[in-house]
Amino acid sequence: MKNFFLIPLAIFVMNKAYSQDYKKQVKNNNQFTFELFSDLNAANKNLFLSPFSVSSALAMTYEGARNKTREEMSDILRFPKDAETINGSFKNLISETQKSTNPKFYILTVANSIWAQKDYNFLHAFFSTVKDCYDAKIEAVNFKTGEERELAREKINHWTAEKTNNKIKNLLDINTLDKDTKMVLVNAVYFLAKWDKSFNKKLTETDTFFGLPQNTKKYFMHTKNRMKYAENEHVKLLEIPYKDKRASMIILMPDTSLNYNEFTTNLTLYSYDKLYKKAEYHNVILTLPKFKLDYKNDLSKILYDAGMRRAFTNHADFSGMTCKKELRIDKIIHQTFINVDESGTEAAAATAVVMKRITSVNPSDLIKFNANHPFVFLIKENTTGSILFIGQLVN
């Protein structure tokens, strides 16, 4: 009779532990968000990233990493070293972030896939783990010949486009893959949400955006609503809610554009959290520019320079994928899209980790918040607290 109760009790304890772990991982992912933003941030350039997507794709890759390769990835990506902890954390995190989806006004989907060389000796245990914990689609393809390789590339791009409502259409360029490619691990994130209170299109008007390095003209939207607001001597923070408060856009803006570069240099998860905790509801008159951004980059050099080096070299150890030390990361392609208008926000991101065979090549007052000069913006999923996207609008 006792044994009857041991199994559900064990499951309860395990699920509770995973719940705590995923909350820790949310904090770690959010810290990586600000670190990656800092590493990629270039003065006078608009930027839009989904470190959440990067973390998710590399978490699958991390499952196959061993020894010093795994240690370096753990340090830079802020992953726990224990496999059960990180896999359980991401399993719950991916599930929790999508629970609040309502097709009428809020969609958030996270999808993973692995495209593996069909005759290569991958470990079944690796595929089993990523399928169970990351809900990854696993498909065998052929990268060896030009014709088959192009077919595989088209399949990967089609899957990514489908999962991002055709916002990420050409993740892998024609020269991304070659005959030594053995695996591509892909994460796709799609976000569509209506504002809690839509902007009136009739009030949208052209005005000056005091940007870097020069001023520009933009369409500015106007609304009045109760929103969370905080400020210190240098920075203002405004949280703009989406429907049902399931997610928010958070604007972080220095007093003037002249202080912008200093502001972003000092922006960390700690400074953001400290200011966010001070936020209280106020009646806010908001002026916000409409904008549309896209971004694409290979993040390999950024992560290599940050200290995740071994994974990209002939000394890489991904023997958790193949039992042998014969794979390395070749590229980490990251592509994003965002459109902010009167009705809401649509955003998408995809990250592809290309694995290659190792070769010799190496409330009281009325607040006026006018976002008419450079600012950083975040999109936060409120169920878990995960920062899904981070970007800056400077021109």
Image (spheres, grey):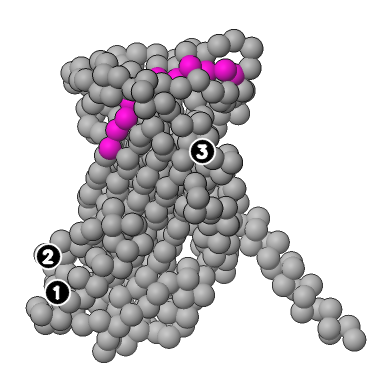
Picture residue at 77% right of the left edge, 75% below the top: 8
Above or below residue 320? Residue 253 is: above
Q: Is label 3 in contact with label 2 (beta carbons under 8 Å)? A: no
Instruction: Judge depth for marks 1 and 3 and give the one in front.
Output: 3
Res 78 visible: no
Q: Earlier in the sequence, mark 1 or mark 3?
A: 1
Q: Is label 1 in contact with label 2 (beta carbons under 8 Å)? A: yes
Residue 315 % position (x, y): 27, 68
Picture residue at 23% right of the left edge, 49% below the top: 296
Res 173 visible: yes
Task: Report helix, strand or loop for mark 3.
Answer: loop
Crowding at label 2, few (<14), some or many (≥20) Cα neighbours within 10 Å?
A: few
Left or right of 44 on screen, residue 98: right
- Residue 150's disc is 1
Q: CA distance from mark 1 to mark 3?
A: 40 Å
Task: Report helix, strand or loop for mark 1.
Answer: helix
Left or right of 104 on screen, residue 164: left
Q: Quadrant of the C terminus?
A: top left
Q: Amino acid at mark 3?
A: Tyr
The picture quadrant where one finds residue 21 is: bottom right
Bounds of the magenta segment: 282-292
Crowding at label 3, few (<14), some or many (≥20) Cα neighbours within 10 Å?
A: many
Q: Earlier in the sequence, mark 1 or mark 2?
A: 1
Q: Earlier in the sequence, mark 3 or mark 2?
A: 2
Name the one closer to the observer, 293 or 201.
Answer: 201
Considering the whole magenta stretch, tell me its main secondary structure.
Answer: strand
The picture quadrant where one finds residue 14 is: bottom right
Residue that label 3 marks: 242
Residue that label 2 marks: 174
